[in-house]
Image (cartoon, helix red, strand yellow):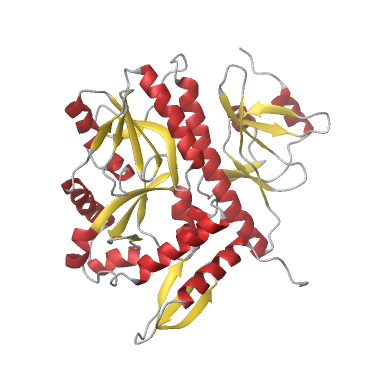
Amino acid sequence: MFGRTRTPEERFTDDFVTTINRLPGIVRITRTDHFGIDVQRAGETGSHSIFLGNLFAEVKHLSPAERKDAVHQFVAAMFNQPDEPENWEAAAPRLRPVLRTASYAQAGQVGGIAVASRPSLRHLVEMLVIDHEHRMSLVNSESLEQWGVTFDEANERAAHNLMAEGTNLARLDNGVFAVASEDTYESSRLMVPGWLAGLGEEVGIKPVAVVPARDMMLIGDERDENALRWMFNEALQIFNDHPRWLSPVPYHADDDGEVVAWKPGRKHPLYNAVRMAERSLELYEYREQSERMEKLFRQAGEDLVVADYTVELLPGGMAQSYTTWPRDADALLPYADVIEFPAESGPFRVSWQRAEQLLTTEWEEALTTPARRRTLTWPTEPTLTKLRTPTPT
C-alpha cells in the first residue's frame, strides 16, 4: 500500500507473465534486467529469451484492453510456432526485409540484443525478419554469423523473396496508388533496389511515396499537386494515430534509382507540408529517445537533462522546431531549427546555424541516435551579446 508505483513497463511485464503462465507446459519464467523475460518449457533444457521493449513501444499508446489483446495475440503466435531456423538453408527462403524507425532499433540494442540492421533513410533503419505464418521475428547479428552470411547477402535474399510474392496496387479515385498486398511488408518494398523507379515506369508516373505505418505505402505522381497534397495530409494523420508508425516523409527515386527524401524548393506549394512531415518524424524519434534516456539516467543516478524537441507553426504555416538551453544544468540538446536561451536579461532565440558559428567550448557532440549535443557550460555575457546581435543581411 505504501510501496512505490509500478512503472508502465513493469505492469506490461506483469500482463505478459500472467498470459504466458496460462499456457500448458511452462516450467519457469524469469524476469531479466533489460525489460525482458526468460521462459523455460517442460522437456527443454534451455530457455526462450523475450525482449519486451519493442512490443511495448508498439502498444503503449493503446488502451489497456487493446494492450492486453495485443499481448494475447503475440503470446499465442510465439508459442504456437516452430523454433527459429538453425542454418542458412532453412532461414534463406523465410527471410524478409523490413523498414523500422531508428528508435525501434535502439530499443533492441538497449535491451541487450544485437539486432542485425543498417542505417537507411534519415531516422530509419533496414532490418531482417524470419517470416512465420502469423508473426515475424527479428534476425540478430549472432544468427547471421552462425549462418555464415553478411547482412548485405541476407538482405539481398530477403528482397528477392519479397519480390517473388509480387505487389498488388490499388488506385484510389484521386489518382493515388496504395500498396494492397496485405502481407504486412507494404513499407518494405520502398528499399528494394530499383522497385520504386521501376514502378514509376510501369504505371507511367513520377512516383513519390510515403510509408506512414509499417503496413502501408501510398504513392502519388510528382506532377499531380492535388493528389500529393491529399496524400501528405493523409500520411501525417495516419502517422500520428497509428501504433506502428513509420514515417510521413515523402520519398522518391533519384537519377540513379536510389530512394531519397523528396525535397521540393521553398517556393513549391507543398514545401510547408513536406517540412511539417520532416519535423513530425523528428519529433516522434526524439520523444522516444527522451523516454529511453531519462529512464536510463534515473537508473544510473545521473543528473542530465534530456532537452525537449518542440514543433510550432509560424505565420504562413511553416513548421519550425526549437529546443531550450537550460541555464543551471548540463543537457543533451536535440538538433532543432532554433535554440532558446533563457538569459537573465530576457529569453531570446537564435538559429542552430548561428549557434554553431559562435559556440565552441560551450558544447560538444554527443554519441546518440538521433544526434544531440551536450551542453558543457552556460555562454558568457559577451557570447550571449554576440548571439543576440542580428546577423547582417
Residue 208 occupies quadrant? top left
Nearer the observer, 271 or 355: 271
Screen quadrant of the C terminus: top right
Nearer the observer, 233 or 357: 233
Q: Residue 127: x, y in percent?
A: 34, 53
Screen quadrant of the N terminus: bottom right
Q: Is residue 138 left or right of residue 153?
A: right
Q: Residue at x 41, y 24 (%)?
A: 230
Q: Residue 111: x, y in percent?
A: 49, 64
Q: Residue 384: x, y in percent?
A: 74, 30
Nearer the observer, 94 or 385: 94
Nearer the observer, 112 or 242: 242
Q: Residue 75: x, y in percent?
A: 42, 67
Q: Is residue 379 visible?
A: yes
Where 358 sits versus 227, above or below? Answer: below
Q: Is residue 371 visible?
A: no
How many numbered marks, from 0 up?
0
Q: Residue at x 36, y 43 (%)?
A: 120
Residue 186 occupies quadrant? top left
* Outermost residue to the right: 345
Where 158 sits versus 36, above or below? Answer: above
Residue 5 occupies quadrant? bottom right
Q: Is residue 117 left or right of residue 273?
A: left
Q: Is residue 391 left or right of residue 22?
A: right
Q: Residue at x 57, y 57 (%)?
A: 64
Q: Residue at x 27, y 59 (%)?
A: 131
